[in-house]
Image (cartoon, rainbow, N blue to C red):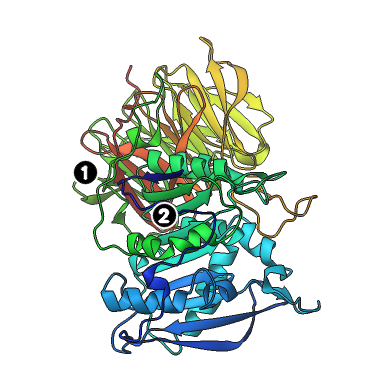
Amino acid sequence: MRILFFCVLSATAALAADDFKAAPEHEANANVPHGTVTRMPAWESKVFAGTIRDWSIYVPAQYKAEQPASVMVFQDGHDYVNTKGNWRVPIVFDNLIASGEMPVTIAIFLDPGQESAKEKPTSAWNNSNRSFEYDSLGDRYARFLLEEILPEVEKSYRLSHAPADRAISGASSGGICSFTVAWEHPEAFGKVLSTIGSFTNIRGGNVYPSLIRKSAHKPIRVYLEDAGGDVDNQFGNWPLANQQMYSALKYMGYDTRFDYVDGFAHSSKHGGSIFPEALKWLWRKETPKVEAVITRNIGGDLPLQQLLIEGEEWQLVAEGLGFADGPCADAEGNFYFSDMKAPGIFKMTPDGLKTQISNEGASGLKWGPDGRLYACQGSKKRVIAINTADGAISVMAEEVQPNDLVVTQKGDIYITETGIQQITKISGDGKSKVAADSGVAGPNGIALSPDGGTLAVSDYKGQNAWVFRIESDGALTAKSPYMTLRTEVNLNAKSPDGRSPVYNGSAAGDGMTTDTVGRYYVTSALGVQVFDSTGRLCGVIPKPQASKPLTSCALAGTNRDYLYVTNGDKIFRRKVQATGNPPPVK
């Protein structure tokens, strides 16, 4: 029995037996133009140092130098380029390009790397670097394509840089590799075709269904295929893993299709048989509106889909800054931030009008119940309060090393002193300061819950955001590592077993904010990590500038429903379905 899983359902004929069955597009047609396949010189990689690989390129007859071509990259290229095998890419491409069911597309066939110092195996399936390159998480393989292979192809052929014109495909470990490339760089690859994909725990790929459900939707189209007779071994169950992948993609509203059939084994027989149909679906011109499936959530769930708005992305609102930090908002929704290199503190209205309100620089800004703007000045070892009406400055504390701060409804100030691993409480009149907590490795961002009764602190050097109960006398109790942040894969580290992904020990948790329903927003190396009031991760919103530090965030705007982030030399905002907490009021 063949089962089809689609976001938009379709039906095809079931296969009569567990064997490859050629489709008409698999057969060479003398009446269509034929492309050419060129075997390229063996490639010595820099990203995968010490490896060499065979590869080849297919160029369709319709290619014209004045028109950038689409491109599709195939892992285990020796199998896909074979015109007697189960894929027969050159023949299928000839037929589909001629019929208009595919654009003019250059195919790149790549074998996995083989260590130069080792004897080359008789079959490329056994190349020494295959599992390391294909099964590993992170963007190392994507960088290999983007920094080495595609630039080399572009020396001879014009390739489109639009992600919708770029596809990547593979089977088994090549399938998860293809997904990883698009997942890490959706701005470079917008289409994925994975058959019998190894979304299992070979090198940690079993995490993908969870990551998909807790990451902002990425603009990629994903085709999956598997069969009931696929592998079930010490690394996991392939059919179940692919069903989990499809379920997660559908839940998050991806344009996705899953072809599944009973029987078959871990081979290209089923995937190859339906390969032409898979390509037609992948390259189809229409983009259907697919909605996320959140009807089965339980009470109290705050999935990312309830926060993000379809079609709303990051918008640039300020650039050319030295180093942006300290975002916050006033009761009217005006946005404030500091440029620490200017230095200066600036106000930005919801319509984008920017004015400078102070020549001081600050790493943390918050409004107090007295209507003054409080600021951390680590370089001057002080905390100040600014009367924005006349610019008057009052020094609230000296001989401190403040990074970020909050001001409670009572007027008490809590600061993070990252260098000495301390949270310090300063009285509202500035006459006393005491150590409220010590021991967090890198206390950094700090925020109050909507009711003001809970204090949350991010740990720049660890993986948690800590919470404390604020007692009536201002003491901090009930310390707990309440939120666990996701961390990046460390591509330079090796696990003891040599196969598991190694994650950074630090999530680089930085500035924080909260909203009226109790979500916590924590900036980090991965992006803005959003948690519900019970400390469960809702999801991660990627940062706008991947190469720049994401220092902090705030909810501002007329309705306080724009999430602003300070991201290196720029500031961005994104409209969300949330409302920010107003400044404390006496």
* Nearest to viewer (mark 2 / mark 1): 2
Q: What residue type is labelled 2?
A: Val
Q: Where is residue 574 in the image (x, y as percent from the top left)?
A: 31, 45
Taking 166 as reference, is 134 left or right? right
Where residue 448 sits, quadrant-wise, is: top left
Q: Which residue is drawn at 30% across and 55% down?
A: 316
Q: Kindly state the secondary structure of the residue where label 2 is placed.
A: strand
In the rendered image, which residue does mark 2 sit on?
222
Where residue 369 sits, quadrant-wise, is: top left
Q: Position of residue 461 (x, y in %)?
A: 64, 42
Taking 98 as reference, is 474 left or right? right
Can you say whether 201 is above or below 558 in the image?
below
Q: Where is residue 360 in the image (x, y as percent from the top left)?
A: 40, 48
Of 251 and 309, the residue lying toward us: 251
Where residue 401 sits, quadrant-wise, is: top right
Can you say whether 493 is above or below 422 in the image?
below
The C terminus, quarter of image: top left
Visible residue check, residue 267: yes
Q: Residue at x 63, y 81 (%)?
A: 54
In the rendered image, which residue does mark 1 sit on?
350
Marking on residue 82: none
Q: Kindly state the secondary structure of the residue where label 1 is placed.
A: loop
